[in-house]
Image: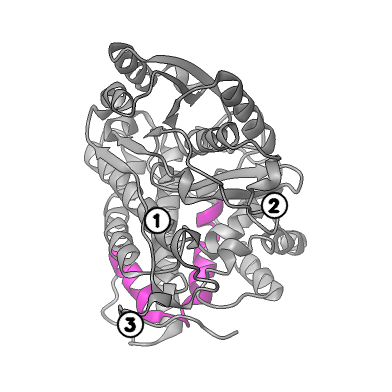
Amino acid sequence: MPCCHADFALTPDSDKAFTVGMPTFTFGAGCLAEAGEHARELGLARVALFTDAMLSRSAHVDAVLASLKAAGIGATVYDEVVVEPTTASFQAAARFAAEGSFDGYISVGGGSVMDTCKAANLYATHPADFMTYVNAPIGGGQRVPGALKPHIACPTTSGTGSETTGIAILNLTEINAKTGIISRRLTPTIALIDPEVTATLPRSVVAASGFDCMSHALESLTARPWPRRLNPARGASRPVSQGANPFSDGLATEALKGVGKYLVRAVGDASDMEARTEMMYAAMLSGIAFNAAGCHLPHGLSYPVSGLARDFRLPGYPLGKTLVSHGMAVVLNNPSVWRYTASCCPERHVHGAACLGAEVRDIKPGSASEAGEVLAGRVIEMMRAAGIPNGLSDLGFGDSDIDALALGAEPQWRVIRNAPKDVTRDDLRSLFSAAMRYW
Protein backbone atom coordinates (compact mmCIF):
# COMPACT_ATOMS: atom_id res chain seq x y z
CA MET A 1 0.00 0.00 0.00
CA PRO A 2 1.22 3.56 -0.63
CA CYS A 3 3.08 5.41 2.06
CA CYS A 4 1.74 8.72 3.24
CA HIS A 5 4.71 10.16 5.10
CA ALA A 6 7.20 12.80 4.13
CA ASP A 7 9.09 15.39 6.11
CA PHE A 8 7.05 18.55 6.18
CA ALA A 9 7.70 22.26 6.44
CA LEU A 10 5.57 24.86 8.19
CA THR A 11 3.49 26.94 5.76
CA PRO A 12 0.87 29.67 6.18
CA ASP A 13 -1.69 27.42 4.47
CA SER A 14 -4.70 27.38 6.82
CA ASP A 15 -5.71 23.91 5.64
CA LYS A 16 -2.50 22.61 7.19
CA ALA A 17 -3.08 24.13 10.61
CA PHE A 18 -2.83 22.14 13.78
CA THR A 19 -4.05 22.89 17.30
CA VAL A 20 -2.37 22.02 20.59
CA GLY A 21 -4.27 21.64 23.84
CA MET A 22 -2.88 20.69 27.24
CA PRO A 23 -3.63 21.17 30.93
CA THR A 24 -1.81 23.35 33.39
CA PHE A 25 0.60 21.08 35.22
CA THR A 26 3.05 21.03 38.11
CA PHE A 27 5.93 18.54 38.13
CA GLY A 28 7.70 18.23 41.45
CA ALA A 29 8.12 16.35 44.70
CA GLY A 30 5.29 16.89 47.15
CA CYS A 31 2.99 18.65 44.71
CA LEU A 32 0.02 16.42 45.61
CA ALA A 33 -0.23 18.50 48.78
CA GLU A 34 -1.15 21.45 46.55
CA ALA A 35 -4.42 19.86 45.43
CA GLY A 36 -6.51 21.78 47.97
CA GLU A 37 -5.02 25.11 46.96
CA HIS A 38 -5.72 24.46 43.29
CA ALA A 39 -9.26 23.28 44.03
CA ARG A 40 -9.93 26.48 45.99
CA GLU A 41 -8.58 28.61 43.12
CA LEU A 42 -10.98 26.79 40.80
CA GLY A 43 -13.85 27.78 43.07
CA LEU A 44 -14.64 24.22 44.14
CA ALA A 45 -16.49 23.47 47.36
CA ARG A 46 -17.31 19.76 47.07
CA VAL A 47 -15.34 17.29 44.99
CA ALA A 48 -15.32 13.59 44.17
CA LEU A 49 -11.93 11.93 44.58
CA PHE A 50 -11.54 8.97 42.24
CA THR A 51 -9.05 6.21 43.04
CA ASP A 52 -8.95 2.41 43.33
CA ALA A 53 -9.30 0.12 46.34
CA MET A 54 -5.56 -0.38 46.81
CA LEU A 55 -4.61 3.28 46.47
CA SER A 56 -7.44 4.44 48.71
CA ARG A 57 -5.31 3.35 51.67
CA SER A 58 -2.14 5.00 50.36
CA ALA A 59 -0.17 8.01 51.51
CA HIS A 60 -0.84 9.59 48.11
CA VAL A 61 -4.59 9.74 48.67
CA ASP A 62 -4.06 10.79 52.28
CA ALA A 63 -1.93 13.73 51.15
CA VAL A 64 -4.59 14.94 48.72
CA LEU A 65 -7.41 14.54 51.25
CA ALA A 66 -5.41 16.41 53.89
CA SER A 67 -4.81 19.29 51.51
CA LEU A 68 -8.50 19.46 50.62
CA LYS A 69 -9.47 19.49 54.28
CA ALA A 70 -6.98 22.27 55.00
CA ALA A 71 -8.50 24.28 52.15
CA GLY A 72 -12.01 23.78 53.54
CA ILE A 73 -13.17 21.66 50.61
CA GLY A 74 -15.45 18.68 51.10
CA ALA A 75 -14.43 15.42 49.44
CA THR A 76 -16.16 12.10 48.83
CA VAL A 77 -13.95 9.17 47.87
CA TYR A 78 -14.92 6.79 45.06
CA ASP A 79 -12.54 3.81 45.25
CA GLU A 80 -14.33 1.33 43.00
CA VAL A 81 -12.28 2.05 39.87
CA VAL A 82 -11.02 -1.18 38.28
CA VAL A 83 -7.70 -1.69 36.52
CA GLU A 84 -8.37 -1.80 32.77
CA PRO A 85 -11.90 -0.27 32.99
CA THR A 86 -14.95 -1.86 31.40
CA THR A 87 -18.34 -0.67 30.17
CA ALA A 88 -19.86 -1.55 33.54
CA SER A 89 -17.17 0.19 35.60
CA PHE A 90 -17.43 3.41 33.54
CA GLN A 91 -21.21 3.34 33.92
CA ALA A 92 -21.03 2.75 37.68
CA ALA A 93 -18.62 5.66 38.08
CA ALA A 94 -20.88 7.89 35.99
CA ARG A 95 -23.88 7.05 38.19
CA PHE A 96 -21.89 7.91 41.31
CA ALA A 97 -20.86 11.26 39.79
CA ALA A 98 -24.37 12.11 38.66
CA GLU A 99 -25.94 11.25 42.01
CA GLY A 100 -23.34 13.23 43.94
CA SER A 101 -23.82 16.55 42.13
CA PHE A 102 -20.15 17.45 42.63
CA ASP A 103 -18.70 20.72 41.39
CA GLY A 104 -15.32 19.18 40.55
CA TYR A 105 -13.25 16.03 40.41
CA ILE A 106 -9.84 14.79 41.52
CA SER A 107 -8.23 11.56 40.31
CA VAL A 108 -5.38 9.85 42.16
CA GLY A 109 -4.09 6.79 40.34
CA GLY A 110 -2.89 5.41 37.04
CA GLY A 111 -4.46 5.67 33.62
CA SER A 112 -7.46 3.55 34.62
CA VAL A 113 -8.35 5.94 37.45
CA MET A 114 -7.84 9.10 35.43
CA ASP A 115 -9.77 7.74 32.44
CA THR A 116 -12.65 6.63 34.66
CA CYS A 117 -12.80 10.07 36.25
CA LYS A 118 -12.89 11.71 32.81
CA ALA A 119 -15.79 9.51 31.73
CA ALA A 120 -17.71 10.04 34.98
CA ASN A 121 -17.31 13.79 34.64
CA LEU A 122 -18.52 13.64 31.04
CA TYR A 123 -21.68 11.57 31.60
CA ALA A 124 -22.62 13.40 34.79
CA THR A 125 -22.22 16.80 33.11
CA HIS A 126 -23.73 15.91 29.74
CA PRO A 127 -25.97 12.84 30.27
CA ALA A 128 -26.47 10.62 27.24
CA ASP A 129 -26.78 7.00 26.21
CA PHE A 130 -23.44 5.38 26.94
CA MET A 131 -22.51 4.72 23.30
CA THR A 132 -23.18 8.32 22.28
CA TYR A 133 -19.64 9.54 22.92
CA VAL A 134 -17.76 6.28 22.28
CA ASN A 135 -15.45 6.47 19.27
CA ALA A 136 -16.99 5.73 15.86
CA PRO A 137 -17.54 3.34 14.19
CA ILE A 138 -18.00 1.29 17.37
CA GLY A 139 -20.04 4.04 19.05
CA GLY A 140 -21.79 7.22 17.98
CA GLY A 141 -18.66 9.33 18.11
CA GLN A 142 -20.67 12.45 18.90
CA ARG A 143 -18.91 15.62 19.98
CA VAL A 144 -19.00 16.55 23.65
CA PRO A 145 -21.49 19.45 23.64
CA GLY A 146 -19.88 21.69 26.23
CA ALA A 147 -17.36 22.20 28.99
CA LEU A 148 -16.95 19.66 31.81
CA LYS A 149 -16.45 20.28 35.53
CA PRO A 150 -12.86 21.00 36.66
CA HIS A 151 -10.67 17.90 37.02
CA ILE A 152 -7.37 17.79 38.91
CA ALA A 153 -5.40 14.70 37.82
CA CYS A 154 -2.71 13.19 40.08
CA PRO A 155 -0.95 10.30 38.26
CA THR A 156 0.68 7.53 40.29
CA THR A 157 2.20 5.56 37.39
CA SER A 158 4.87 6.54 34.88
CA GLY A 159 3.57 5.81 31.44
CA THR A 160 -0.02 6.44 30.43
CA GLY A 161 0.23 10.23 30.22
CA SER A 162 -3.52 10.35 30.81
CA GLU A 163 -3.08 13.44 32.98
CA THR A 164 -2.31 15.40 29.79
CA THR A 165 -4.79 13.91 27.30
CA GLY A 166 -8.41 14.19 26.23
CA ILE A 167 -8.73 10.40 25.90
CA ALA A 168 -10.48 7.80 28.07
CA ILE A 169 -10.00 4.11 27.24
CA LEU A 170 -12.18 1.17 28.27
CA ASN A 171 -12.80 -2.47 27.44
CA LEU A 172 -16.18 -2.46 25.71
CA THR A 173 -17.51 -5.78 26.95
CA GLU A 174 -20.16 -6.02 24.25
CA ILE A 175 -17.45 -6.66 21.65
CA ASN A 176 -14.69 -7.78 24.05
CA ALA A 177 -12.25 -5.19 22.73
CA LYS A 178 -10.91 -1.86 23.84
CA THR A 179 -12.09 1.47 22.53
CA GLY A 180 -12.46 4.90 24.00
CA ILE A 181 -13.85 8.39 24.12
CA ILE A 182 -11.81 11.27 22.76
CA SER A 183 -12.47 14.98 23.11
CA ARG A 184 -10.37 18.02 23.91
CA ARG A 185 -12.91 18.73 26.66
CA LEU A 186 -11.86 15.57 28.56
CA THR A 187 -8.35 16.91 29.17
CA PRO A 188 -7.85 17.48 32.90
CA THR A 189 -7.83 21.10 34.01
CA ILE A 190 -4.71 20.71 36.14
CA ALA A 191 -2.18 17.88 36.48
CA LEU A 192 -0.12 17.45 39.65
CA ILE A 193 2.78 15.14 38.79
CA ASP A 194 4.79 14.03 41.82
CA PRO A 195 7.70 11.72 40.87
CA GLU A 196 8.01 10.47 44.45
CA VAL A 197 4.89 8.33 44.02
CA THR A 198 6.82 6.02 41.69
CA ALA A 199 8.93 4.71 44.58
CA THR A 200 6.22 2.20 45.52
CA LEU A 201 5.43 0.93 42.01
CA PRO A 202 6.06 -2.81 41.35
CA ARG A 203 8.58 -3.55 38.61
CA SER A 204 5.91 -5.09 36.36
CA VAL A 205 3.88 -1.87 36.48
CA VAL A 206 6.97 0.27 35.80
CA ALA A 207 7.80 -1.93 32.81
CA ALA A 208 4.33 -2.06 31.28
CA SER A 209 3.56 1.63 31.78
CA GLY A 210 7.07 2.61 30.69
CA PHE A 211 6.72 0.78 27.39
CA ASP A 212 3.35 2.47 26.91
CA CYS A 213 5.19 5.78 27.28
CA MET A 214 7.81 4.64 24.75
CA SER A 215 5.17 3.63 22.24
CA HIS A 216 3.26 6.90 22.65
CA ALA A 217 6.43 8.74 21.64
CA LEU A 218 7.38 6.42 18.76
CA GLU A 219 3.84 6.46 17.38
CA SER A 220 3.71 10.26 17.61
CA LEU A 221 7.00 10.49 15.72
CA THR A 222 5.96 8.08 12.95
CA ALA A 223 2.28 8.98 12.62
CA ARG A 224 0.79 10.27 9.39
CA PRO A 225 1.89 13.92 9.14
CA TRP A 226 -0.71 16.50 10.03
CA PRO A 227 -1.04 18.11 6.55
CA ARG A 228 -2.03 14.69 5.14
CA ARG A 229 -4.65 13.74 7.71
CA LEU A 230 -8.13 13.08 6.32
CA ASN A 231 -10.75 15.66 7.28
CA PRO A 232 -8.42 18.12 9.01
CA ALA A 233 -11.44 20.28 9.94
CA ARG A 234 -11.21 23.80 11.27
CA GLY A 235 -11.53 25.65 14.54
CA ALA A 236 -13.16 23.77 17.40
CA SER A 237 -13.96 20.87 15.05
CA ARG A 238 -10.30 20.06 14.54
CA PRO A 239 -9.58 16.64 16.09
CA VAL A 240 -7.61 16.21 19.29
CA SER A 241 -4.98 14.04 17.61
CA GLN A 242 -3.91 15.53 14.31
CA GLY A 243 -0.92 13.55 13.06
CA ALA A 244 2.80 14.13 13.46
CA ASN A 245 3.67 17.81 13.73
CA PRO A 246 6.68 19.92 14.77
CA PHE A 247 5.35 20.35 18.31
CA SER A 248 4.82 16.62 18.92
CA ASP A 249 8.14 15.76 17.26
CA GLY A 250 10.13 17.75 19.81
CA LEU A 251 8.29 16.31 22.80
CA ALA A 252 8.47 12.74 21.48
CA THR A 253 12.20 13.09 20.88
CA GLU A 254 12.88 14.21 24.45
CA ALA A 255 10.63 11.49 25.87
CA LEU A 256 12.43 8.78 23.89
CA LYS A 257 15.83 9.95 25.11
CA GLY A 258 14.61 9.57 28.68
CA VAL A 259 13.06 6.16 28.04
CA GLY A 260 16.18 4.84 26.36
CA LYS A 261 18.37 5.90 29.25
CA TYR A 262 16.15 5.23 32.25
CA LEU A 263 13.40 2.64 31.59
CA VAL A 264 15.42 -0.52 32.20
CA ARG A 265 17.08 1.11 35.21
CA ALA A 266 13.69 2.08 36.66
CA VAL A 267 12.37 -1.46 36.25
CA GLY A 268 15.43 -3.08 37.79
CA ASP A 269 15.86 -0.94 40.90
CA ALA A 270 12.98 0.56 42.87
CA SER A 271 15.45 2.68 44.84
CA ASP A 272 16.78 4.38 41.71
CA MET A 273 14.78 7.58 42.12
CA GLU A 274 16.64 9.35 39.36
CA ALA A 275 15.44 6.74 36.86
CA ARG A 276 11.89 6.64 38.20
CA THR A 277 11.67 10.45 38.24
CA GLU A 278 12.92 10.68 34.66
CA MET A 279 10.38 8.06 33.55
CA MET A 280 7.58 10.09 35.15
CA TYR A 281 8.81 13.13 33.22
CA ALA A 282 9.05 11.16 29.96
CA ALA A 283 5.49 9.91 30.47
CA MET A 284 4.24 13.48 30.77
CA LEU A 285 6.11 14.59 27.64
CA SER A 286 4.92 11.64 25.55
CA GLY A 287 1.36 12.16 26.80
CA ILE A 288 1.34 15.71 25.47
CA ALA A 289 2.99 14.50 22.25
CA PHE A 290 0.51 11.76 21.43
CA ASN A 291 -2.45 13.88 22.46
CA ALA A 292 -1.35 16.29 19.74
CA ALA A 293 -0.23 13.75 17.12
CA GLY A 294 -2.23 10.60 17.89
CA CYS A 295 -1.21 6.98 18.18
CA HIS A 296 -1.47 4.46 15.39
CA LEU A 297 -0.85 0.74 14.79
CA PRO A 298 0.75 -0.46 18.05
CA HIS A 299 -2.24 0.89 19.98
CA GLY A 300 -4.80 -0.21 17.40
CA LEU A 301 -3.41 -3.75 17.50
CA SER A 302 -3.20 -3.80 21.29
CA TYR A 303 -6.93 -3.56 21.93
CA PRO A 304 -7.96 -7.03 20.70
CA VAL A 305 -4.90 -8.50 22.44
CA SER A 306 -6.21 -7.20 25.77
CA GLY A 307 -9.78 -8.22 24.99
CA LEU A 308 -9.12 -11.73 23.66
CA ALA A 309 -6.44 -12.89 26.10
CA ARG A 310 -7.20 -16.09 27.97
CA ASP A 311 -5.89 -17.11 31.39
CA PHE A 312 -2.96 -14.69 31.59
CA ARG A 313 -1.96 -12.95 34.81
CA LEU A 314 0.79 -10.49 35.55
CA PRO A 315 2.44 -10.01 38.96
CA GLY A 316 1.73 -6.61 40.47
CA TYR A 317 -1.75 -6.38 38.97
CA PRO A 318 -5.09 -7.48 40.53
CA LEU A 319 -5.35 -11.22 41.18
CA GLY A 320 -8.14 -13.52 40.17
CA LYS A 321 -8.81 -12.53 36.58
CA THR A 322 -7.20 -12.64 33.17
CA LEU A 323 -5.52 -9.31 32.53
CA VAL A 324 -3.01 -8.18 29.94
CA SER A 325 -1.98 -4.69 30.98
CA HIS A 326 -2.36 -2.03 28.33
CA GLY A 327 1.35 -1.22 28.08
CA MET A 328 2.27 -4.87 27.63
CA ALA A 329 -0.33 -5.36 24.88
CA VAL A 330 1.06 -2.29 23.13
CA VAL A 331 4.75 -3.16 23.25
CA LEU A 332 4.24 -6.76 22.13
CA ASN A 333 3.13 -5.39 18.76
CA ASN A 334 5.88 -2.77 18.48
CA PRO A 335 8.70 -4.61 16.68
CA SER A 336 6.45 -6.08 13.99
CA VAL A 337 4.96 -2.63 13.33
CA TRP A 338 8.31 -0.82 13.00
CA ARG A 339 9.54 -3.34 10.45
CA TYR A 340 6.30 -2.74 8.52
CA THR A 341 6.11 1.08 8.64
CA ALA A 342 9.80 1.90 8.14
CA SER A 343 9.39 2.17 4.37
CA CYS A 344 7.27 5.29 4.81
CA CYS A 345 9.75 7.31 6.85
CA PRO A 346 13.03 5.43 7.41
CA GLU A 347 14.77 8.53 8.77
CA ARG A 348 12.18 8.87 11.55
CA HIS A 349 12.56 5.22 12.52
CA VAL A 350 16.32 5.64 12.68
CA HIS A 351 15.89 8.82 14.72
CA GLY A 352 13.62 6.98 17.17
CA ALA A 353 16.14 4.16 17.51
CA ALA A 354 18.97 6.62 18.13
CA CYS A 355 16.98 8.41 20.82
CA LEU A 356 16.46 5.05 22.54
CA GLY A 357 20.19 4.44 22.53
CA ALA A 358 20.72 2.26 19.46
CA GLU A 359 23.90 2.49 17.41
CA VAL A 360 22.83 3.92 14.04
CA ARG A 361 26.08 5.19 12.46
CA ASP A 362 26.28 2.32 9.98
CA ILE A 363 22.62 2.49 8.87
CA LYS A 364 22.42 3.19 5.15
CA PRO A 365 20.46 6.44 4.55
CA GLY A 366 17.00 5.72 3.18
CA SER A 367 17.20 1.96 3.75
CA ALA A 368 13.76 0.91 4.98
CA SER A 369 14.85 -2.59 5.98
CA GLU A 370 17.78 -1.34 8.03
CA ALA A 371 15.71 1.44 9.61
CA GLY A 372 12.94 -0.93 10.64
CA GLU A 373 15.37 -3.50 11.95
CA VAL A 374 17.43 -1.09 14.05
CA LEU A 375 14.32 0.28 15.76
CA ALA A 376 12.68 -3.13 16.21
CA GLY A 377 15.97 -4.55 17.47
CA ARG A 378 16.43 -1.83 20.10
CA VAL A 379 12.85 -2.27 21.34
CA ILE A 380 13.35 -6.05 21.59
CA GLU A 381 16.61 -5.51 23.48
CA MET A 382 14.78 -3.33 26.01
CA MET A 383 11.86 -5.77 26.26
CA ARG A 384 14.21 -8.61 27.13
CA ALA A 385 16.07 -6.52 29.71
CA ALA A 386 12.80 -5.51 31.38
CA GLY A 387 11.32 -9.03 31.47
CA ILE A 388 8.55 -8.55 28.90
CA PRO A 389 7.11 -11.78 27.38
CA ASN A 390 8.50 -13.01 24.08
CA GLY A 391 5.67 -12.00 21.78
CA LEU A 392 1.98 -12.83 21.72
CA SER A 393 2.63 -16.58 21.95
CA ASP A 394 3.80 -16.11 25.56
CA LEU A 395 0.32 -14.77 26.33
CA GLY A 396 -1.28 -17.94 24.95
CA PHE A 397 -2.05 -16.77 21.41
CA GLY A 398 -1.30 -18.89 18.37
CA ASP A 399 -1.79 -18.97 14.62
CA SER A 400 -5.43 -19.98 15.10
CA ASP A 401 -6.10 -16.63 16.80
CA ILE A 402 -4.74 -14.41 14.04
CA ASP A 403 -8.05 -13.96 12.19
CA ALA A 404 -9.86 -13.03 15.42
CA LEU A 405 -7.13 -10.57 16.37
CA ALA A 406 -7.25 -8.92 12.95
CA LEU A 407 -11.03 -8.74 13.04
CA GLY A 408 -10.86 -7.15 16.50
CA ALA A 409 -8.32 -4.56 15.38
CA GLU A 410 -10.13 -3.54 12.21
CA PRO A 411 -12.79 -1.35 13.91
CA GLN A 412 -10.02 0.68 15.59
CA TRP A 413 -9.78 2.87 12.53
CA ARG A 414 -9.47 6.07 14.58
CA VAL A 415 -5.89 5.09 15.39
CA ILE A 416 -5.15 2.72 12.49
CA ARG A 417 -5.85 5.46 9.95
CA ASN A 418 -3.23 7.57 11.68
CA ALA A 419 -0.55 5.09 10.56
CA PRO A 420 1.87 6.35 7.90
CA LYS A 421 0.45 3.91 5.33
CA ASP A 422 -2.97 2.49 4.55
CA VAL A 423 -3.61 -0.87 6.20
CA THR A 424 -5.71 -3.82 4.97
CA ARG A 425 -7.02 -6.80 6.93
CA ASP A 426 -4.31 -8.94 5.33
CA ASP A 427 -1.75 -6.45 6.64
CA LEU A 428 -3.24 -6.79 10.12
CA ARG A 429 -2.98 -10.57 9.90
CA SER A 430 0.66 -10.31 8.86
CA LEU A 431 1.46 -7.92 11.70
CA PHE A 432 -0.08 -10.21 14.33
CA SER A 433 1.67 -13.22 12.83
CA ALA A 434 5.01 -11.44 13.00
CA ALA A 435 4.35 -10.47 16.63
CA MET A 436 3.94 -14.06 17.88
CA ARG A 437 7.63 -14.50 18.78
CA TYR A 438 10.70 -12.26 18.57
CA TRP A 439 13.62 -14.25 19.96
Name the element at disc 3.
loop
Residue at the spot 66% in from the left edge and 69% down from the top edge? 428
Which image quarter: residue 406?
bottom right
Q: Which mark is residue 138?
A: none
Q: Position of residue 285 (x, y in %)?
A: 32, 52
Up/down of 83 relative to 239, above or below? above
* 337 inside magenta stretch: yes
Q: Position of residue 230 (x, y in %)?
A: 54, 74
Up/down of 279 relative to 11, above or below? above
Q: Please, what is the three-letter code of the amino acid marked with disc 1?
A: Met
Residue at the spot 61% in from the left edge and 20% down from the top edge? 99
Dot 1, crowdedness within 10 Å: few (<14), some or many (≥20)? many
Q: Position of residue 182 (x, y in %)?
A: 54, 51
Name the element at disc 1.
helix
Residue at the disc numbered 3: 363
Residue at the spot 53% in from the left edge and 61% down from the top edge? 298
Q: Earlier in the sequence, mark 2 or mark 3?
A: 2
Q: Which mark is residue 214?
A: 1
Residue stretch rendered in magenta on the structure: 329-355
